[in-house]
Image: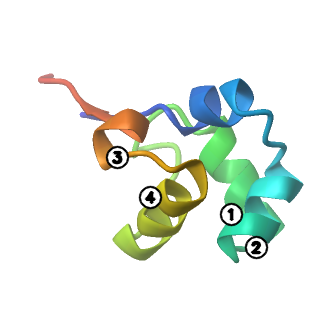
Amino acid sequence: MIKYKIGNMAKSKGFSARRLADAAGVSPNTAALLIKAKNHKDYNVCTDVLDKVCTVFGCRLDDILEYRKR
């Protein structure tokens, strides 16, 4: 299972959904879903959006995603 850590990263960097949306060039709805989602079953995101999020946060993919065996 892929666990999202985007909400934790956003909180630690002081990003609201609106600020993340503006900075990453995604819709406010997408940003809100990314921040609220706990795993890929909550919200399925494409790699293009993950790339934008990593660019905004200045982080690596493994900083915002975690793989856990079921």
- Label located before the other in sequence (4 or 1): 1
Nearest to the observer: residue 63 or residue 67: 63
Kind of residue at badge 1: Thr
If the image is split into quadrants, where does the C terminus sit?
A: top left
Secondary structure of the residue carrying tag 1 is: helix
- Label located before the other in sequence (3 or 1): 1
Foreground tag (4 vs 1): 1
Distance from disc 3 to disc 4, alpha carbons, whole Å, reads: 19 Å
Which residue has dot 2 on it?
Answer: 27
Secondary structure of the residue carrying tag 4 is: loop
Q: Is residue 6 left or right of residue 27?
A: left
Which residue has dot 4 on it?
Answer: 44
Label 3: few (<14), some (14–19) or many (≥20) C-alpha neighbours in 10 Å: few
Residue under the image location 43 percent in, 45 percent down: 59
Name above or below for residue 60 compared with residue 49.
Answer: above
Q: Please provide percent x and percent y for residue 54.
A: 47, 55
Q: Quick check: marks 2 and 1 in contact, CB under 8 Å?
A: yes
Q: Is residue 34 left or right of residue 60?
A: right
Q: Quadrant of residue 23?
A: bottom right
Foreground tag (3 vs 2): 3
If the image is split into quadrants, where does the N terminus sit?
A: top left
Which residue has dot 3 on it?
Answer: 60
Secondary structure of the residue carrying tag 3 is: loop
Name above or below for residue 70 compared with residue 7.
Answer: above
Kind of residue at badge 3: Arg
Distance from disc 3 to disc 2, alpha carbons, whole Å, reads: 22 Å
Q: Please provide percent x and percent y for residue 25.
A: 70, 77
Distance from disc 3 to disc 1, alpha carbons, whole Å, reads: 20 Å
Q: Quick check: marks 2 and 4 in contact, CB under 8 Å?
A: no
Report the disc number at residue 30: 1
- Label located before the other in sequence (3 or 2): 2
